[in-house]
Amino acid sequence: MSEAIQESDDEGSQNEYIPRVGGEIDLDISVDSESPFVVIPRGGAKEIGRSCYQVETRNGTYLVDVGLNQGDGGLFPDLRGLDEGQIDAVFLTHAHIDHVGSLPLLESHDFLSDQAPVITTRPTAALADTLLRDSLKLHRRATQKPGREQQYSETDLRKVIDRFRPCGYQAADLSDHVAHIEDTETLHFEFGNAAHLLGSAWLALTVDGSRVVFSGDIGGRSNHLPEIDEPPQADALFLESTYGDTHSHTSATDTRTDIYNEAIDAATDGKPVLIPCFGVGRSQELLYMFKNRVHTLPEEDRKQLNVVYDGMAQSATDTYNEHCRSEFAAESIRNYIVNSGDQQPFLFDQASAARRMPMSREELLEADETPIIIAPSGMLSGGFSPTYLLEFCQRYDDARVILCGYQAEGTPGRQLEDAIEEDLERVGVTLPSNGLNGGIPDEGEGTRVKVPVSWISRYHGLSAHAARNTLLQFARQVSSSQVYLIHGEQEQQEKMAQHLRDNLDSVSKIQLTGMMHPVSVSPDLPEEEIVGDRPAKRILDERGADIEVSDSAQFGSDAVHGTLSGFSDQIEALELALRTLSGQLAVERHDSGFSEEDIRQIVRDEMDEIVREAVEENQSN
């Protein structure tokens, strides 16, 4: 096979809190028949966070995800060079803050056209609503610091949420969702299950005979989600690489058992347990883990068990229970609901939402029952988890802190994780909290504590991100000649690129994407096979000796209609029909296994029919 690894240079991270918007920026965006798609990474290039990818076609501008950063580096995507009203639609792959957190920014800066929808799955729409409302509260607090301005308001948030167009795992034409889009835009999209969290999806976009697939975040390791849907074949794949350096993860089943045993043993021994984790996805997985195991405890131990979930995990768990009867949940959960009549498969008698407890959080920590607390954020960078850790340090001689998710650079969670490797006795961290009764500190401030390293446990086996062998399998299914690595730190991406080189026969280019470096996507088929610079002109030229076309001809086909005033108009109309047909046939080319000769013959037969109808109508006039 022919291979090349190309690496785009990053111009450096944005460290300012103010987003990069407006102004002129020189981007090489040339969309034509040879490059029906141009993709511009505006975030998520050689980093994990602020995922955002601009997709240009001949007739539209779209964004795939619009996230926030949670670690070091720029907070927002780089939105320079976008014009007011330029974005025709936004596609969201799933509801994690690093994929949806900057959505209101599009509204506050008027980047969205009047009727631009935000297209995503039904659970993602519901969970993103919860995430964004919580994020607005944090944003308001952060911008109270002198010299900072609030970048979006509650009005912006409401407006962008009103744009949501929820759907299932399905394929559809963009025109079904965007009333104002040009008639010439033939973009077709498809969502498939990515098994990362409830409603997560990979996204396939097809236009002008070419297709690109965005993996989103690939999972496949959950105890409550269906298996990953097989993606369609495509010309280019934008592939996440979070664990591109990891051959395979530790068994998720074994990890759940280990976490459960450690938490139960500690609580039974009178040691409070804090499990910092994502409010969306990981919290529900842990609750489901406890639910499936607590029945094995002796009755007396069950009575003393007190599992509390807090913060955003409360609303997210409600959403999980609402959507787990549909295609978005594993068949085992759907069957359980039918057979048991239990409408809340993620909850159990010993689990309580903090807001529904008959006591305050302070009383919880003083109660006789030793609590197991599940609270975001997983990196201890916000939410209630840093407050609980601060209270643990001030109240208890012994406790357990169980880390079970990714810890970004620059976060308190990463400091705790690193301390295990450094074999320290205690680790000093500044927590973004003033305690249960102290209010929320300004950004960059907080309370300094020393956490005993003996309290800390780290488990890697619950990652919702696939290891590189699953990513390789996904890439093989897409079978594209071009693979662009996104959503990963550079070291992981470099190792993933090498793994793809060694094991992927279809690939001719593997590239580490760079911020604001446009990527042109070319169809696998040569342009002369289906679509060229003037495809309709070529078809007419081939039949020119046999066909006379009058300047006043009117085409009778449904694909081409209206009075044409000249030969150039006839060519434009034929090109429109051909682009529409090519977009439809691209799906068949990839999905149904049609050969290049099959596609070529179908196109010529259809265009012959259009020309024949035009000639007959012209002669009758």
Image (cartoon, grey):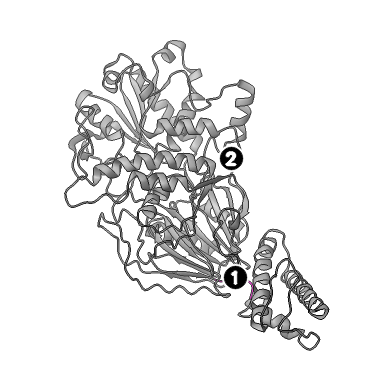
Dot 1 corresponds to which residue? 523
The answer to whether 304 appears left or right of 209 in the picture is: left
Q: Judge the density around disc 2: few (<14), some (14-19), many (≥20) Cα neighbours within 10 Å.
A: many
Q: Is residue 308 left or right of residue 225?
A: left
Q: Where is residue 420 in the image (x, y as percent from the top left)?
A: 29, 40
Name the image quarter holding the N terminus: bottom right
The answer to whether residue 292 is left or right of residue 407 is: right
Residue type beneath disc 1: Pro
Q: What residue type is labelled 2?
A: Pro
Residue 606, quarter of picture: bottom right
Q: In this view, does 288 lie to the left or right of 67?
A: right
Residue at 19% x, 35% y is 450
Q: Which of marks 2 and 1 is in front?
A: 1
Q: Which of 24 and 613 is in front in this view?
A: 613
Residue at the spot 21% in from the left edge and 32% down from the top edge: 439
Residue 241 appears in view: no
- Considering depth in this image, is 547 or 199 the residue closer to the camera? 547
Residue 176: image x %, image y %? 60, 54
Residue 124 in the image, given as x and y percentages of width and height: 49, 43
At numbered mark 1, what does the secondary structure look like: helix, strand or loop?
Answer: loop
- The magenta stretch is 522-526
| Number of the label disc, if any, that sits on residue 226 | 2
Mark 2–mark 1 distance (CA, rounded to whole Å): 31 Å
The prevailing secondary structure element of the residues shown in magenta is: loop
Q: Which of marks 2 and 1 is nearer the N terminus?
A: 2
Residue 198 at what x, y percent from top left? 51, 40
